[in-house]
Image (tube, helix red, strand yellow):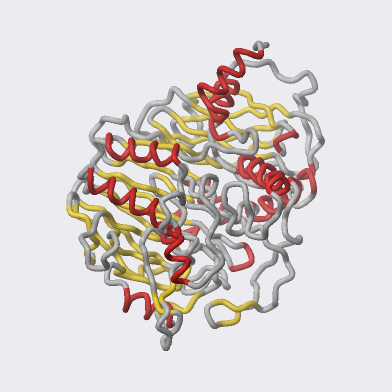
């Protein structure tokens, strides 16, 4: 197929790069002439598992990657396109095949496969698998969402992220898989780009921890570097189990590229044109390893990540991207000066286009509940720098560092009388649960927030017996719970109440840590504000 230049440019301007990728990938195309139709492998090629993502009422995206030697450059693959067949069935035994087809694992995309499945029945589970040559993948389970306007009485989902490989074992992902949620939201920091040269053992919150496992390379910069880092992380069986158990919505934060990056800048002052090279290959590697639809295909060094989904009439899900469009974190000056600069009206966390999209979605939603699924803390928390200090400190990497964006969003929720909004996120490596208010600490709750702790980042943690937890609780009445332990948030939502459980593990530096619930809270429909369950 050919397209003349004027039509192509018009399409780019009208639909954006992500939409162009979606249209192009949807077109029927013959297999490449050099495709390897009957490949053979020295060892099992599906070492990185399978995954499903971005569920809708009639389908979802399917993912796998061929990598018989995942920790070698190229994954141990011959550099030719390979035909991969796939099946989606209504039963785990694959007696009733709902759909099947052939996809191409391109070497340009690290032999990853992305299949956009449509035309399925709403509100039901499906099972899927892949074949390459004589090899078969494990079976994954996904599900379609209920029709957008159909009555739904319950949804269950997990929120997790910040899974530093060196910080511990992924027991939390195994427990999430066992809970069989309707979907998972991964808020970001799927990998950590950092090197392998830090102190051994390493400090975290006043304690020293030996590293239970190690990165294999220095800090990652090239496309091959990022691919190897993803291969290392995705080789973990507990993470693979969680992917195979339920469909995921994923969104990236900073460590998928570089710590604290923002838009076209990194934290080190690297020239923009140089950093954009790194960002482009990082985004390609992210797409190669995530169950994303073609609309998120990276183009021009950018990705379309913010998106929306409806779980019947019960839940409207808004997935945000708080990295590609934000201004750089304020890193210089004392806290009073930082706080003043953070309130400048020209500072943005979401960018104008994404903010308008979010505001329109919130205002027009008829869903019983609305979920804003994003990356960083929205509560405007502060604490003294120490128990003897009078200086209050705020996180400049969270919404607190973008006060105008935060205020605009909360005022919009308040002005449109949407009393059904709950926010989830992560990044701070601690559980926080609290209410979202404007400037006054005792103001009315506009929405509520469940801020998930890390899967492993920060090692085991020390619970509530630390100074930051005590001071945060003392100076922020809107904060209802906080703990420095690893885990995830599990939400169960019905038509009248939203329950959030703060799940914690006693240890992640050892395998099979004990899971418990640190605290549980309820939000009653139409009444913003957390109540102890």
How many numbered badges does the structure rendering display? 0
| Residue 102, position as x, y percentages in the image | 63, 24
In this view, 485 is above or below 251: below
| Residue 367, position as x, y percentages in the image | 26, 38
- Toward the bottom, the furthest residue is 388
Query: As rendered, which of 123 and 299 lies closer to the eye?
Result: 299
| Residue 325, position as x, y percentages in the image | 52, 45
Q: Quadrant of the C terminus?
A: bottom left
Q: Quadrant of residue 415?
A: top left
User: Would residue 12 appear left or right of 281 to someone viewing this image?
Assistant: left
Name the residue: 66% across, 79% down: 201
Q: Quadrant of residue 59?
A: top left
Q: Quadrant of the N terminus?
A: top right
Query: As rendered, which of 284 and 170 lies closer to the eye?
Result: 284
Name the residue: 59% across, 26% down: 21
Query: As rendered, which of 320 and 202 lies closer to the eye?
Result: 320
In this view, 275 is above or below 84: below
In this view, 353 is above or below 348: above
User: Would residue 325 appear left or right of 479 to someone viewing this image?
Assistant: right
Query: As rendered, which of 109 and 270 lies closer to the eye?
Result: 270
| Residue 332, position as x, y percentages in the image | 56, 67
């Amino acid at each position: 197929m050919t397209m003349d230049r004027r039509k192509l440019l018009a399409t780019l301007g009208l639909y954006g790069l992500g939409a162009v990728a979606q249209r192009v990938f949807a077109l029927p195309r013959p297999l490449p002439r050099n495709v390897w139709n009957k490949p053979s492998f020295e060892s099992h090629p599906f070492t990185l598992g399978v995954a499903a993502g971005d569920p809708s009422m009639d389908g979802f995206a399917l993912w796998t990657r061929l990598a018989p030697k995942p920790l070698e450059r190229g994954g141990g693959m011959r550099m030719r396109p390979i035909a991969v067949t796939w099946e989606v069935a209504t039963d785990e035994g694959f007696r009733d095949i709902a759909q099947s087809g052939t996809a191409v694992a391109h070497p340009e995309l690290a032999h990853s496969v992305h299949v956009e499945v449509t035309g399925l029945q709403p509100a039901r589970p499906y099972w899927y698998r892949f074949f390459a040559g004589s090899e078969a993948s494990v079976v994954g389970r996904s599900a379609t969402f209920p029709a957008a306007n159909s009555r739904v009485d319950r949804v269950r989902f997990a929120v997790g992220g910040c899974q530093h490989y060196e910080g511990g074992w992924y027991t939390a992902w195994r427990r999430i898989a066992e809970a069989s949620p309707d979907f998972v939201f991964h808020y970001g920091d799927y990998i950590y780009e950092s090197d392998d040269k830090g102190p051994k053992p390493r400090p975290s919150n006043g304690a020293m921890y030996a590293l239970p496992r190690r990165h294999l390379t220095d800090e990652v910069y090239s496309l091959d570097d990022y691919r190897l880092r993803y291969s290392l992380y995705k080789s973990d069986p507990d993470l693979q189990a969680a992917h195979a158990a339920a469909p995921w919505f994923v969104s990236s934060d900073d460590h998928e590229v570089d710590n604290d990056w923002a838009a076209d800048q990194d934290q080190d002052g690297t020239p923009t044109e140089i950093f954009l090279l790194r960002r482009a290959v990082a985004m390609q590697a992210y797409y190669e390893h995530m169950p994303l639809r073609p609309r998120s295909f990276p183009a021009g060094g950018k990705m379309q990540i913010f998106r929306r989904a409806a779980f019947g009439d019960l839940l409207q899900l808004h997935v945000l991207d708080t990295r590609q469009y934000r201004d750089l974190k304020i890193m210089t000056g004392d806290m009073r000066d930082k706080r003043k600069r953070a309130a400048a009206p020209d500072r943005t966390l979401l960018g104008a286009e994404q903010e308008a999209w979010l505001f329109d979605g919130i205002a027009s939603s008829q869903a019983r509940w609305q979920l804003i699924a994003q990356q960083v803390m929205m509560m405007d928390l502060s604490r003294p720098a120490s128990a003897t200090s009078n200086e209050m400190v705020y996180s400049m990497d969270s919404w607190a560092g973008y006060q105008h964006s935060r205020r605009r969003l909360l005022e919009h929720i308040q002005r449109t009388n949407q009393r059904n909004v709950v926010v989830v996120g992560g990044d701070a490596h601690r559980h926080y649960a609290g209410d979202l208010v404007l400037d006054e600490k005792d103001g009315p709750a506009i929405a509520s927030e469940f801020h998930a702790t890390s899967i492993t980042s920060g090692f085991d943690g020390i619970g509530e017996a630390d100074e930051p937890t005590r001071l945060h609780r003392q100076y922020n009445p809107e904060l209802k719970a906080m703990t420095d332990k690893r885990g995830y948030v599990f939400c169960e939502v019905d038509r009248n109440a939203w329950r959030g459980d703060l799940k914690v593990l006693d240890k992640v530096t050892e395998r099979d840590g004990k899971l418990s619930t640190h605290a549980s809270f309820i939000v009653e429909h139409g009444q913003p504000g957390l109540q102890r369950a």
